[in-house]
């Protein structure tokens, strides 16, 4: 069990306080991941900054959630799967697409499926996507800018997924209806 402290703006180190205050204002509550990351102000700032930059990519809100959910699923992050399932619903993702992402199934939308497969390849192959992976992604209508934007999204999620593995944050009540647990067969791989 983790012994990380989960801060609020009052208890956090000085460098984390403004970021936590801004997050609470934005979300209406302070997600536990941010309270945990507050232990290291640079890590919190890095995550918040990268997440904000990823939001500026050419991907639609739904496409961004496909990247974030795919990386979180591949990395086995229960917390991020629940949190980004909520974000995906806010982005008005089709329920069939969300269900497929959560279940590691083929997406009903061909272009989103190409994005899911490419993101999965980037995570699984640690960035060494092969020519066939790249070709399939480009053939689906994406471009070289999108390749690097997937890498950015994977980087954002790798930071939060790995931190969550170590911090073991309690799932916030707001995310409980979307709780997700990695299937045992995948966890053993």
Image (tube, grey):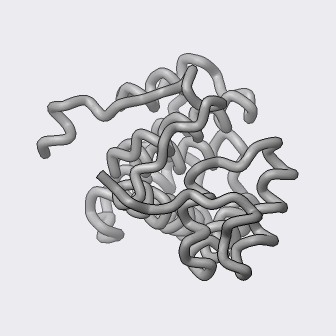
Q: Quadrant of residue 3?
A: bottom left
Extreme-right residue of the structure: 25
- What percent of the width, then of the height, locates residue 61? 72, 44
Which residue corresponds to the image point at 40% horizontal and 51% vertical from the top-left? 168
Q: In this orientation, which residue lies closer to the viewer: 126 or 144?
A: 126
* Percent position of residue 19, x then y: 76, 68
Residue at (42, 29) in percent of width and height = 180
The relative height of residue 13 versus residue 63 in the rendered view (above or below) is: below
Q: Position of residue 79 (x, y in %)?
A: 47, 42
Residue at 49 percent of width and 50 percent of height: 139
Towards the viewer: 152 or 23: 23
* Residue at horizontal 73 percent and vertical 80 percent from the top: 14
How many labels sit on residues?
0
Q: Quadrant of the C terminus?
A: top left
Q: Please state which of residues 161 and 167 is positioned toward the viewer in this rendering.
A: 167
Report if residue 120 is visible in the image.
yes
User: Measured from the top left, where is residue 141 in percent x and y?
Assistant: 59, 49
Task: Specify whether 97 is left or right of 100.
Answer: right
Position above or below: 62 against 7: above
Q: Is residue 134 visible?
A: no
Which residue lies most toward the front here? 11
């Amino acid at each position: 069990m983790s012994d990380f402290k989960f801060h609020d703006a009052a208890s956090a180190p000085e460098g984390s306080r403004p970021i936590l205050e801004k997050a609470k204002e934005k979300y209406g509550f302070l997600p536990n991941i941010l309270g945990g990351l507050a232990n290291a102000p640079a890590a919190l700032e890095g995550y918040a900054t990268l997440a904000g930059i990823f939001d500026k990519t050419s991907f639609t809100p739904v496409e961004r959630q496909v990247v974030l959910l795919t990386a979180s699923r591949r990395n086995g992050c229960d917390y991020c799967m629940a949190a980004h399932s909520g974000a995906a619903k806010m982005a008005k993702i089709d329920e069939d697409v969300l269900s497929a992402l959560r279940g590691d199934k083929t997406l009903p939308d061909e272009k989103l499926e190409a994005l899911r497969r490419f993101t999965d390849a980037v995570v699984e192959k640690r960035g060494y996507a092969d020519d066939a992976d790249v070709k399939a992604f480009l053939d689906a209508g994406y471009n070289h800018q999108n390749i690097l934007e997937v890498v950015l999204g994977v980087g954002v999620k790798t930071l939060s997924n790995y931190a969550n593995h170590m911090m073991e944050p309690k799932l916030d009540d707001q995310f409980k209806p979307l709780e997700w647990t990695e299937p045992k067969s995948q966890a053993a791989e």
